Amino acid sequence: MAENKIPYKIYLEENEIPNQWYNVRADMKNKPAPLLNPGTLKPMTAEELAPVFCEELVAQELNETDAYIDIPEEIQNFYKMYRPSPLIRAYFLEKALGTPAKIYYKFEGNNTSGSHKLNSAIAQAYYAKKQGLKGVTTETGAGQWGTALSMACSYFDLDCKVYMVKVSYEQKPFRREVMRTYGASVTPSPSMDTAIGRKILEQHPGTTGSLGCAISEAVEVATTNEGYRYVLGSVLNQVLLHQSVIGLEAKAALDKYGITPDIIIGCAGGGSNLGGLISPFMGEKLRGEKDYRIIAVEPASCPSFTRGKFAYDFCDTGMVCPLAKMYTLGSGFIPSANHAGGLRYHGMSSTLSQLYHDGFMEATSVEQTSVFEAAEQFARVEGILPAPESSHAIRVAIDEALKCKETGEEKTILFGLTGTGYFDMVAYEKYNDGVMSDYIPTDEDLKPGFDAIPKFPGNEF
Ligand SMILES: *Cc1c(COP(=O)(O)O)cnc(C)c1O
């Protein structure tokens, strides 16, 4: 295909939106380790998961054999409101960098929630409704997941209780208001509503909260209120499954023009957007059909992949959730106070953790001032104001494109632009004022987190 025939934006037709999700676990020889019951240390059964999660989502969580799972028609219809998302050739960025590399990005910020999280929120709300539940509970940090879930719940007329990390609740009143506009109730976490919240507040008065703590509260509320279940916006296998719609669309759009990426880059918090973007490409790699360089990018201040331990650990601070085998900094880990760029979860998807452990992907960490530098450079030439999280991927895409400039290689780079940054202007303000600083935790800083990882036979790290 002649170069000038490739449009700036590659859109799929509406009937090309995938009608099945792709489950990468089906093609993995080494499956991700199962969730363990923290009491018995035995794999969690569907029966044990049922009080916490919706039935069909439990089935998806445990399904490691079906490569394709049908997307119910109701979810497909909702996807049509904001999908297919565009795959954009970053011509202007390429020109600004003077690189021979070709850069593409899959933009997931084209919906009111401002991120990819809506892809899984709508699926989780659908299955909750189908089960006849009254509502769902969840946690939110920066607020994107809570917003996405509020939108999904209002679409299916479900109650939505969001526990929002206190520091974000105070710093991002507009996020909170978007959620309330969609009918959700938003409570700052830790709160006095739950036993775990009261305990955490007693032990750490004045704490501004953490994701792990908000998760504990949301799980408690779901399991103690009839007709409620807990839903999670990242990390879990089911979330990666729903997010595979990103990768399937990206691959279909590239295939239309015969384009094969050499490098695929995504930011990694809990791993859902990256897992979703790479899934179909990883499938080809696992089946030995093609090879790609796949790079996870994380903040240097929350380096789960690059400095974490591959071990069974708690998913939450309250230690009420099952144990997951993953790269982890320890469930008590909280990034330093100056960290502004999101991606602050202590662990990582167990599917991606296994793939990384087995050498199918790389990981790298970047410091936040260099992330915001990349964000600004991107915004000024490509027009989109990126979320700080997404900008981790932009940073590494730019770095790889600059390497191509040195070597003269015309590599094709694909990265995930997960969302927009309109609610992150306090972080941008810090960067613009020149008061943003970097902090890389020392080994000393990380030690207490590692020390708190549960010790039991078989969990050596
Ligand atoms: C939540 C979020 C992320 C990180 O979550 P993953 O599960 O790792 O994808 C990245 N970008 C944006 C815009 C987000 O909202």
Image (cartoon, rainbow, N blue to C red):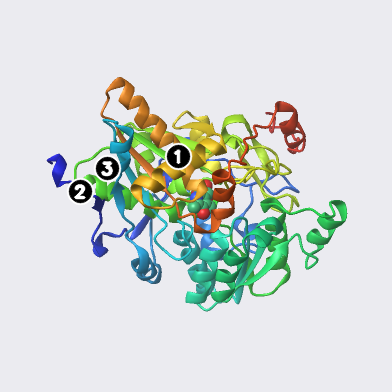
Number of numbered discs visible in the structure rendering: 3
Q: Secondary structure at mark 3?
A: helix
Q: Which residue is mark 2?
A: 256
Q: Secondary structure at mark 2?
A: helix
- Foreground pick, 191 / 437: 437
Image check: 152 left or right of 221?
Answer: left
Disc 2 CB within 8 Å of nearest ligand 1 atom: no
Q: Is residue 31 left or right of residue 452?
A: left
| Identity of the residue drawn at 75% across and 35% down | 456
Q: Earlier in the sequence, mark 3 or mark 2?
A: 3
- In the rendered image, which quarter is residue 4 located in? top left
Q: Amino acid at mark 1?
A: Ala
**x%, y% of residue 203?**
86, 52
Which residue is under mark 1?
374
Which numbered disc, 3 or 1, marks the residue that appears first in the sequence?
3
Question: In the image shown, does 307 or 181 lie closer to the viewer?
Answer: 181
Q: Amino acid at mark 2?
A: Lys
Category of crowding for the residue at label 2, using alpha-carbon neighbours closer than 10 angstroms: few (below 14), some (14–19), many (at least 20): few
Q: Which residue in the protein does label 3 denote?
A: 91
> Disc 1 beta carbon < 8 A from ligand 1?
no
> Of callouts 1 and 2, which one flags the residue occurring earlier in the amino acid sequence?
2
Find residue 146 and report its horizontal and vertical position in percent: 57, 63
**Which class describes the residues within 10 Å of circle 3: few (<14), some (14-19), or many (20+)?**
some
Query: Where in the figure is residue 173, as x and y percent of width and height?
Result: 62, 65
